[in-house]
Image (cartoon, grey):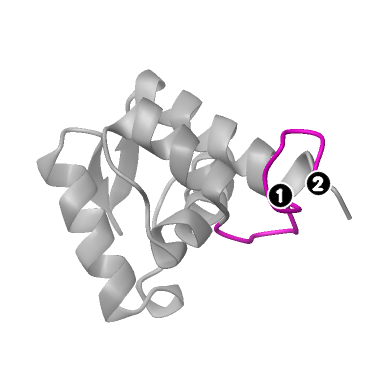
Amino acid sequence: MSKYNYEPQGRGRLTERIKEISLKLLGYEVTVIEFRLMPYIISTMTNQQKIEPSRINSEEKAILKKWRQAGHIKGGASGLVITKEFWDICCELVFAGYVDLDE
């Protein structure tokens, strides 16, 4: 058992802990694909600030569309913009699921 009384948090695993954090911050439980897209969004915004269309699949495009409709992001291949609130949410989820591990 992890230090948080959940199943062990492995790198990039969608655990109950991650679902609980996303429910609290986004109002819904993220999917594994959505969760694993967040590090790419963080990297994209930190570097080129443009989505590389060849690096995302149709499921990820649908997630980006959902995030656009929710007002979290704007743009894409021509330039990506992200709200500070959504940036913070992505960072918190990525920290919990990729950095603060029980491995």
Residues 47 and 58: in front is 58
Give the mark toward the camera: 1 or 2: 2
| Position of residue 62 in the picture relative to residue 32 (left or right) | left
Crowdedness near tag 2: few (<14), some (14–19) or many (≥20) residues, C-alpha within 10 Å? some
| Position of residue 12 in the picture relative to residue 90 (left or right) | right
Query: Is there CB contact under 8 Å for labels 1 and 2?
Result: yes
Whether 58 is drawn above or below 25: the answer is below
Residue 16 visible to the viewer: yes
- Give the secondary structure at mark 2: loop
Q: Examine the structure image and report whether residue 80 is included in the region drawn in magenta.
A: no
Crowdedness near tag 1: few (<14), some (14–19) or many (≥20) residues, C-alpha within 10 Å? some
Whether 48 is drawn above or below 34: the answer is above
Q: Three-letter amino acid code at disc 2? A: Leu
Residue lying at the far left of the rendered structure: 69
Residue at 70% x, 52% y: name it: 7
- Residue on which the image places disc 2: 101
Residue at 35% x, 47% y: name it: 29
Q: Main secondary structure of the magenta part?
A: loop
| Position of residue 37 in the picture relative to residue 64 (left or right) | right
Please give the range of residues in magenta.
Answer: 2-14
| Position of residue 95 in the picture relative to residue 8 (left or right) | left
- Residue on which the image places disc 1: 98
Q: Position of residue 10 (x, y in %)?
A: 75, 58
Residues 42 and 10: in front is 10
User: What's the distance in space between the residues labelled 1 and 2, CA to CA?
Assistant: 7 Å
Q: Examine the structure image and report whether residue 10 is included in the region drawn in magenta.
A: yes
Residues 87 and 12: in front is 12
Q: Position of residue 103 (x, y in %)?
A: 89, 55
Picture mark count: 2
Q: Three-letter amino acid code at disc 1? A: Tyr
Q: Position of residue 80 (x, y in %)?
A: 33, 44
